[in-house]
Image (cartoon, rainbow, N blue to C red):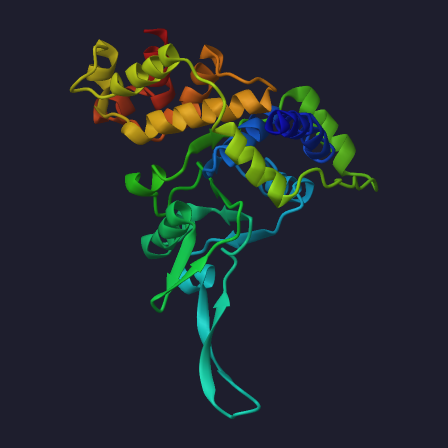
Amino acid sequence: METKEKYKALVNKLPELKSEIAKVIVGQSEVIDEILISFLAGGHCLLEGVPGLAKTLMVKTLSEALNMQFKRIQFTPDLMPGDILGTEILEEDHETGKKFFKFNKGPIFSNIVLADEINRTPPKTQAALLEAMQEYKVTYGGTNYDLEKPFLIIATQNPIEQSGTYPLPEAQLDRFLLYIKLAYPSENEELAVLKSTTGTAKPKVEKVFSAEDMIELQGLARQVHIDDDLIIKVNKIVRNSRPETSTSEYVKKWCEWGAGPRAGQALILCSKARAVLKGRFSVTPEDIETLAFPIMRHRITLNFRAEAEGITTDDVVRELIKN
């Protein structure tokens, strides 16, 4: 009974959290929902959008409303793994005169980390995020350092400029729970942005959640009910994305590789998190169909023919849901 009351109290604060973010960010409610879903499900997300869509401001505002540590890492071609994880420095004990190495923690040791333009840095530095994303720890000099909890990496990339970039390998893309695409705002939203950001007003974002609240919600999200029929539905969507076992001629024609089992796990966990965000206690088919796009779009590989014809992975997901 106590758990249920606590769950209700936390869930009832989620609309307030979104209202605080809306003080600064106009529109983009679907994107904000997906970021929160990723956080509630305990995963990380990749944001793709052209410059000027307030990606950095969105993440910073979220961290303020959540009252959590926030760090931004600007990825550049000369960025090294130590710039992210931290490094050892030689220090001297003033009492004994002995020298020793001390590990100085890098910006990865925060609750919310914005990896800005992650495809601008070489694979060696990109790979430094892999252990942190999956294991929630950093190993340096044979010693393990636990990361802050809760922990969320939000990586961004610009889809326009591809010269001088290092596309993320499939293995690292798969580590991201959601691949979120940002679109341009509507005409009315853009008008509201122009009015609200070119004056003297500076909205203050109130703190709604604490780190402990978010950890509590992450645990409660896993307890959300999902029917066996819906788990079977998820399994069929994922398995049908693989050309060798698919019953869809569309998939066999356009796809080279399909999604792995991690996609099914992600779809169920995120559907549970979306149910929490909507104030429900069970998963619906709408949760699964809505989240299939950001979960599957980076886990399906198209063949050359599909790319030449302008077919996208979203088209494939749409076909999978329809069938």
Q: Please identify the quadrant where the N terminus is shown.
A: top right
**Left-right relation of 60 to 236:** right
User: Which residue is farthest top?
Assistant: 323
Query: Residue sitting at 53 percent across and 45 percent down?
Result: 150
Can you give x and y, in whole percent of width and height, for residue 155 in the image? 47, 43
- Whether residue 106 is situated above or below residue 31 in the rendered picture: below
Q: Nearer the viewer, residue 186 or 21?
A: 21
Q: Is residue 164 visible?
A: no
Quarter of the rendering containing residue 241: top left
- Whether residue 85 is situated above or below residue 232 in the rendered picture: below
Can you give x and y, in whole percent of width and height, for residue 301 in the image? 27, 28
State how many labels appear: 0
User: Which residue is farthest right?
Assistant: 200
Q: Is residue 121 visible?
A: yes
Quarter of the rendering containing residue 299: top left
Q: Please identify the quadrant where the C terminus is shown.
A: top left
- Whether residue 49 is situated above or below residue 139 in the rendered picture: above
